[in-house]
Amino acid sequence: MIHVRRASRAILAVCFFCALLQSVVSYAQTAPSGGPAAGQTAAAKAAEPSASARDLFLRYKDRLLQVRVLLASASEQSALGSGFVVRNEGAQGALVVTNYHVVSSLAVEPQKYRIELRGTNERKVNAKLVAVDVVHDLAVLRTEPAAGEPAWTAFELREAPLVQGSKVYALGNPLELGFLIAEGIYNGRVESRIYEQMLFSGALNSGMSGGPAIDEAGRVVGVNVATRRDGSMLSFLVPVRYMRELLARAGQAEPPGEWHSALARQLRGHQDFVAGKLLGGGKAPAEAGFASQTLAGRTVPTLDGGLTKCWANGLTGEKLRYHRDSLDCSLRSELFVSRSLSTGSLSLQHVVLRNDKLPTIKFLHIASGARSLGVVSSGNDNISRSECHDRYVQGSQHVYRVGICVRAYRKFAGLYDYNVQAIQVDDAQERLSSSLQLRGFSFDNAQQLTTLFLERLQ
């Protein structure tokens, strides 16, 4: 463990950024960003629907919609997804639920895009965005009233929770090939997710994002959101309870003229929630923060295994003539904001290099290849350029060179990317390189997490 007095001097060096960040924040002006999430899915072949599935589709297809995000200057589609009617409000129009990632380009750049909805009967109507939930990937649209048009029919939402093994039917408009229904099984909650998601053993295809998943009575149980590219018939649904919460908010106030402040508020709330998981949430100091794990005989800080995924790798052999052991861990918390920006994640990496038969000078040359301090960026439309600082820190057993790089989000005030790298420099035959990467965290939370991380290095 790093000595507190010496560690505090190292961590106080982070305050070097307090002044720098004033200029970084002032530089964080609105700039164009990318478009939609491209569906976040891969094509999967659907099985022939059963008689009950065909009956359900015929009964409920008039409540389905294709969601088209159009580039206003060209009136051509920029993103496609699905949606469904959940409430008919007469002269005020109908409320439609879809995924946030389907309409993200409109939320980020509302002046450039507009929304058009198309029903199974080819009925078309314009709509506006009235509520977003970037954390759970949901959005609510309101149709524009059209004189002489019939009222929309709405889906009923299921109240009781599903039992694992229940049949579920996903509906949508995949790949602009037509509306369809995909039959599958609800297989419980997805494990190791920071927010609840439902595991659907059925086929979701690109373009079905935002469509409803219904039970055998036609009641909505969830919203189609994604499928695993590396799996077969493994898909995910957003539980209906998150949709209810967003619908309640959608009716409380007029929608904002721009969505950056609402998105920023939700992203800040997300990183507070993630940081709280690691900072203790009321636990005793000894129980808070990072866990510890052994890697090649070295004790290194890691993340709580209940919410993270870790992968280890080891390279050795006669030809290699040195040992390389690595550990990569990440917290499953990343949020999609736009096609060019995903944020809210935390990850770390440790690499232990040990010399076996190499000449010392050659080993040090190899070890120096991993000595890039932080992730330096020149900046882009979403994030400012990096401001970096480094110094040497005495740990309980070894000396480290610690580098920290910070960059600010242009559109979402109060959020930063924070990269920390600690490289052991006092042993010519063994080197530990440890890094912590925070994406979209507040400055205070990032400093606290960095302090805990460094204090747990030997």
Image: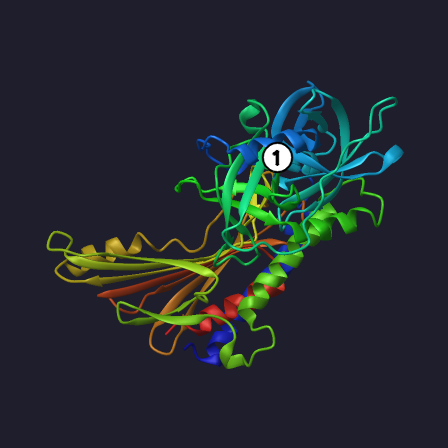
- Quarter of the C terminus within the rendering: bottom left
Please, which colouring scheme is shown? rainbow
Q: Residue at x 15, y 62 (%)?
A: 356
Q: Nearer the viewer, residue 370 or 128?
A: 128
Is residue 287 shown above or below 102?
below
Residue 401 in sight in this render: yes
Please give the count of numbered marks on the rendered protein.
1
Instruction: Looking at this view, name the residue that lies furthest to the front.
Output: 51
Is residue 158 shown above or below 130?
below
- Where, by quadrant of the figure, is residue 364 drawn? bottom left
User: Residue 179: x, y in percent?
Assistant: 59, 27
Q: Residue at x 39, y 41 (%)?
A: 230
- Where, by quadrant of the figure, is residue 44 drawn? top left
Q: Residue at x 25, y 66 (%)?
A: 430
User: Residue 352: x, y in percent?
Assistant: 29, 62
Mark 1: amino acid = Leu
Report the side of 223 relative to 258 (left or right): left
Residue 25 in sight in this render: no
- Quarter of the N terminus within the rendering: bottom left
User: Residue 49: x, y in percent?
Assistant: 50, 32
Q: Nearer the viewer, residue 4 or 148?
A: 148
Report the side of 252 relative to 225 (left or right): right
Report the side of 172 relative to 132 (left or right): left
User: Residue 431: x, y in percent?
Assistant: 29, 64
Dot 1 lies on which element? helix
Q: Is disc 1 surrounded by few (<14), some (14 to 19) or many (20+) residues within 10 Å?
A: some
Query: Badge 1 is on which residue?
Result: 56
